[in-house]
């Protein structure tokens, strides 16, 4: 009979207590996995943006400020700018779904010059350029919804008083999930004009690809200096800084989440330690018998620690597994918030989560294990005498 | 199965005193105990509660160390041995039988008997042979897959005896082995212990603590303790005072 078999039998001795302990570890680690996954997805987005030579130009007041469409050509003509497009958030709903995926009004002529890492068949790109109501979308959206080229996508305006009736002209591939649909900026602007909408000819933001990373500070300064004293002063920043802005919006929440995570681990260690201490108290006589028949302290220590670690690790596998499944589900259902795969979001956290569970087991088991190992055989046997 | 030759001295207790300390108090439990046991001896320790009989048993079994004096069992001076050495020594030389059987409830009869063998370097097959032989001695080979809760008290105690003899120890120590059994089961256990003591195949040296005169009658020697002193000894139905 091997030691692990004995450990396993002891875990099953009080199945409800063991199950509750495993589940308390599991649910807490699942929560932490999801929270860290969300934070890491923000980091991943920022890090992937850092590899691109792109800048984002927006009104100094932020998204609410205007950025005239004329600025796009002016940005294009700036030295070192390879390509630039307007990029206006539409935020429409599809059927009953609000924010089903990201939708941007842009320039079909240049959008794939700004994002050259995206690939689309030439004939589909050509169709997109020539069809005013045409749109292109990320392959992941098409696969998720079973859409194909030629299908119509009606989008109801939520921000703008104008509904879009789009036809899928093409499907593009991107290294990471963009969860985005692009359509003609002109189509939106014309529609708004017909509705007598006040804020027309607004590009929203401008995304520009710079020919070399060394030139980015020069381009940013040049653009912001140019519009500094105009009616629409700009704030230009790298794409990475732009996404960092969203991460920063979480501000202290991020620190809070991480600290809550540590607090959860600490409180869990107390819960598990209490559970282990209860189990050991019930088994004082048995431990005394084991020691009487010759089990050395080290083996008793190992058995108790092994039990605590096994319980915690089972909770760890359960928790990280549930967290991964949840994130995978969110990636499918709400890719606009969770655009990356589980591995992209979590990566090493899966390992860290399991290590955290093992450490939790060690912390919670060490005191009961030492007490069991150091317990006097005579005192233990006397408990039932 | 015995390791020692006939009449070889197994236990030597020489001028042993044992004191316990509770808070500021020093409580003398044994005073100047002298005792010798040879291979095949069967000793019953009797006396009122608090007389020190279980303490003496624990000293002989290597579960405790004397405050002064020597306890030499199977050639090992237990008072001078470390905790680790005592654990190892007990696993080789002592088999324990407890009043409440003290089987591990999550293990089957077979696994309970196998437990002491997991401390040895025996192969799985050898362990299996030993366990089955021990269960056969106690007549429970057909109950090896039963858990303790599925056995009667007498059967549990027989499994405990199988666990005690599976490593072929020289010495068996029993603390009230029939204290929790009905008369019939108690008689069966005492018969079994008698076999282990008398049959040439086993020749176990047994030290038993008991309150039961019937159980003590099975022993070759009976020592009476009172207030930590040996007050009388009965050997082969002859009583002699041994007040020290």
Image: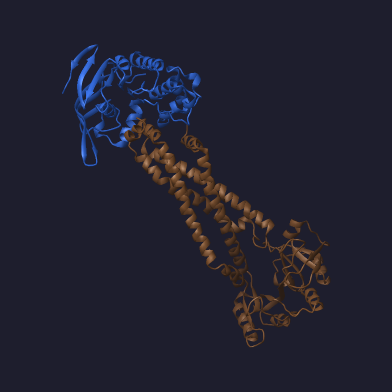
Side (left or right) of B230 relative to A1: left
Side (left or right) of B94 relative to A140: left
Residue A20 image position (x, y, % from top left):
52, 44
Side (left or right) of B170 relative to B227: right
Q: In which quadrant of the rendered image does the C terminus of chain A lie?
A: top left
| Colour in which chain B is drawn | blue
Side (left or right) of A130 relative to A6: right
Figure check: B28 above or below A190: above
Residue A28 image position (x, y, % from top left):
53, 52
Comparing A22 with A348, the one in front is A22
Residue A331 image position (x, y, % from top left):
66, 57
Q: Which residue is drawn at 67% across and 86% down?
A: A231
Residue B83 quadrant: top left
Comparing A176 with A287, the one in front is A287
Residue B36 quadrant: top left
Residue A191 quadrant: bottom right
Q: Which residue is drawn at 68% across and 61% down?
A: A177
Figure check: A363 above or below A234: above
Residue A135 seen anywhere in this rendered image of the structure? yes
Residue A195 image position (x, y, % from top left):
80, 77
Figure check: A268 above or below B60: below
| Colour in which chain A is drawn | brown
């Amino acid at each position: 009979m091997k030691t692990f078999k004995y450990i396993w039998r002891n875990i099953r001795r009080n199945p409800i207590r063991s199950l509750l302990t495993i589940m308390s570890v599991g649910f807490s680690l699942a929560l932490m996995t999801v929270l860290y996954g969300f934070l890491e997805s923000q980091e991943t987005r920022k890090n992937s943006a850092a590899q691109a030579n792109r800048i984002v130009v927006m009104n100094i007041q932020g998204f609410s400020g205007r950025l005239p469409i004329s600025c796009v050509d002016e940005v294009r003509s700036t030295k070192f700018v390879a390509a630039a497009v307007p990029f206006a958030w539409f935020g429409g709903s599809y059927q009953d779904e609000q924010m089903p995926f990201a939708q941007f009004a842009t320039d079909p002529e240049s959008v794939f010059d700004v994002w050259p890492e995206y690939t689309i068949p030439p004939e589909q790109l050509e169709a997109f350029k020539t069809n005013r109501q045409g749109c292109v979308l990320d392959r992941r959206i098409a696969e998720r919804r079973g859409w194909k080229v030629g299908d119509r996508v009606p989008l109801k305006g939520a921000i703008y008083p104008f509904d879009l009736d789009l036809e899928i002209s093409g499907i593009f591939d991107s290294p990471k999930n963009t969860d985005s649909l692009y359509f003609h900026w002109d189509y939106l602007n014309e529609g708004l004009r017909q509705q007598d909408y006040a804020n027309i000819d607004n590009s929203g933001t401008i995304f520009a690809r710079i020919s070399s990373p060394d030139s980015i500070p020069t381009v940013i300064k040049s653009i912001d200096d140019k519009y500094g004293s105009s009616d629409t002063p700009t704030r230009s920043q790298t794409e990475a800084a732009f996404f960092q802005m969203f991460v920063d919006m979480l501000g202290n929440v991020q620190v809070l989440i991480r600290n809550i995570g540590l607090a959860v681990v600490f409180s869990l260690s107390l819960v598990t330690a209490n559970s282990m201490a209860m189990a050991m108290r019930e088994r004082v006589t048995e431990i005394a018998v084991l020691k009487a028949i010759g089990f050395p302290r080290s083996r008793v220590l190992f058995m108790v620690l092994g039990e605590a670690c096994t319980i915690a690790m089972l909770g760890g596998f359960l928790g990280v597994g549930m967290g991964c499944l949840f994130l995978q589900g969110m990636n499918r259902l709400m890719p606009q918030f969770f655009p990356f795969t589980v591995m992209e979001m979590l990566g090493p956290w899966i390992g860290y989560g399991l290590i955290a569970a093992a450490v939790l087991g060690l912390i919670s088991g060490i005191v009961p294990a030492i007490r069991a190992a150091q317990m006097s055989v005579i005192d233990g046997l006397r408990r039932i005498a | 199965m015995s390791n020692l030759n006939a009449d070889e001295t197994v236990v030597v207790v020489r001028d042993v005193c044992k004191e316990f300390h509770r808070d500021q108090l020093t409580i003398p439990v044994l005073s100047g105990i002298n005792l010798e046991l040879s291979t095949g001896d069967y000793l019953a320790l009797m006396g009122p509660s608090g007389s020190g009989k279980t303490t003496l048993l624990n000293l002989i079994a290597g579960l405790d160390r004397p405050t002064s004096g020597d306890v030499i069992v199977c050639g090992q001076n237990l008072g001078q041995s470390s905790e680790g050495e005592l654990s190892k020594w007990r696993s080789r030389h002592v088999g324990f039988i407890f009043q409440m059987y003290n089987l591990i409830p999550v293990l089957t009869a077979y696994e309970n008997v196998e437990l002491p063998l997991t401390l040895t370097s025996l192969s799985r097959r050898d362990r299996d042979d030993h366990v089955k032989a021990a269960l056969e001695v106690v007549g429970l080979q057909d109950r090896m897959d039963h858990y303790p809760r599925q056995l009667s008290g007498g059967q549990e105690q027989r499994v405990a005896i199988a666990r005690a003899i599976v490593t072929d120890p020289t010495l068996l120590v029993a603390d009230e082995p029939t204290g929790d059994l009905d008369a019939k089961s108690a008689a069966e256990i005492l018969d079994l212990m008698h076999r282990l003591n008398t049959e040439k195949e086993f020749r176990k040296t047994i030290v038993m603590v008991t309150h039961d005169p019937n159980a003590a009658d099975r022993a070759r020697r009976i020592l009476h303790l009172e207030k930590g002193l040996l007050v009388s000894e009965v050997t082969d139905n002859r009583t002699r005072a041994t007040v020290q």
